[in-house]
Image (cartoon, rainbow, N blue to C red):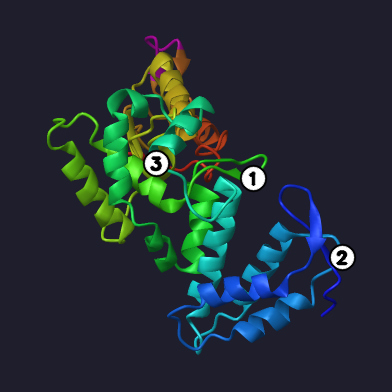
Amino acid sequence: MNQSLLVTKRDGTTERINLDKIHRVLDWAAEGLNNVSISQVELRSHIQFYDGIKTSDIHETIIKAAADLISRDAPDYQYLAARLAIFHLRKKAYGQFEPPALFDHVVKMVELGKYDTHLLEDYTEEEFKQMDGFIDHWRDMNFSYAAVKQLEGKYLVQNRVTGEIYESAQFLYILVAACLFSNYPRETRLEYVKRFYDAVSTFKISLPTPIMSGVRTPTRQFSSCVLIECGDSLDSINATSSAIVKYVSQRAGIGINAGRIRALGSPIRGGEAFHTGCIPFYKHFQTAVKSCSQGGVRGGAATLFYPM
């Protein structure tokens, strides 16, 4: 390995590659894991280094090298890769490994328009300090590699165009809890916030995608599924289509009761015309569902009910 290689840091400056720093990060990530070899990860990743490489690219290379070693015989590589990915994610979000104070983070994100202003309206700085005491950031290290990639791809608040990440998992969990219990009595709500946070951050409760990705943001999407009753008139059919587009874009799955639409050949306006039947309108709904994504998280999805 050529130790004279120059690397480009996140702030744009360059320095000589420091293999000891890489080794220390790997040593930290491997703490408490079984049957993982730091040297194997280093050997796999060194081959791909080149002069001028970004430190962020080095980190991604090491993560991939660790992930490639995941196997039935050595499953703990999934946790090694996950910890390295968490380290990288926090660097992207905060510019450092240690997360900031919760209140400072929320103020910054509200100013950037990434978090809901209701967070600062509903809770005081002192309450945020109490919530900060509930957080155990080491719980990030319990994720598997697949779970971290899910978080990064679907759930964390981010700019999906530029790839910027704005938070880490424990802030996600505590702020979802804060939003869900904001209207509870002030004397007891922080106890509910803590209990809920502990349950979701230790994987005792699994939350639906719209809540994980939408609650705490200006989207204010609290429903993972939206049921729509469609009538038999054109106004109702068009309103159904409009509602589908609106709620798919806000990350909700859709359920449609379309059983009231008349059958093929039914009379319209006393026999003035034949009805074209259900299928054209069902295709219209399908087009509405697929016209936009669930807030960039995934494609729209719907279930249509027709009584037999």
What main secondary structure does the magenta stretch of the protein show? loop
Q: What separation in Å lies between label 1 and label 2 (alpha carbons)?
A: 24 Å
Say which amino acid is labelled 3. Answer: Leu
Residue 152: x and y in percent read 53, 53
Q: Which residue is mark 2?
A: 51
Q: Which mark is residue 102?
A: 3
Picture disc at residue 163: 1
Image location (x, y in percent) of residue 62? 66, 71
Q: Residue at x 85, y 77 (%)?
A: 2
Q: Nearer the viewer, residue 295 or 44?
A: 44
* Mark 1 / mark 2, whichever is N-terminal: 2
Is residue 275 visible in the rendered image? The answer is no
Q: Residues within 10 Å of mark 1 (few under 14, many from 20)?
A: few
Q: What's the residue type where badge 1 is placed?
A: Gly
* In the displayed structure image, the side of residue 106 where residue 29 appears, left or right: right
Q: Is residue 198 above or below residue 70?
A: above
Q: Residue 118 magenta-drawn?
A: no
Identify the secondary structure beneath mark 3. helix
Q: Quick check: can you spot residue 192? A: yes
Q: Decide: marks 3, 2 in contact (CB < 8 A)?
A: no
Q: Which residues are magenta?
A: 267-272
Give me the residue at 31% from left, 61% from top.
Answer: 203
Marks 1 and 2 close (CB-CB < 8 Å): no
Secondary structure beneath label 2: loop
Q: Nearer the viewer, residue 110 or 72?
A: 110
Looking at the rendered structure, the secondary structure element under dot 1 is: loop
- Tell which circle, 3 or 2, labels the residue nearer the N-terminal end: 2
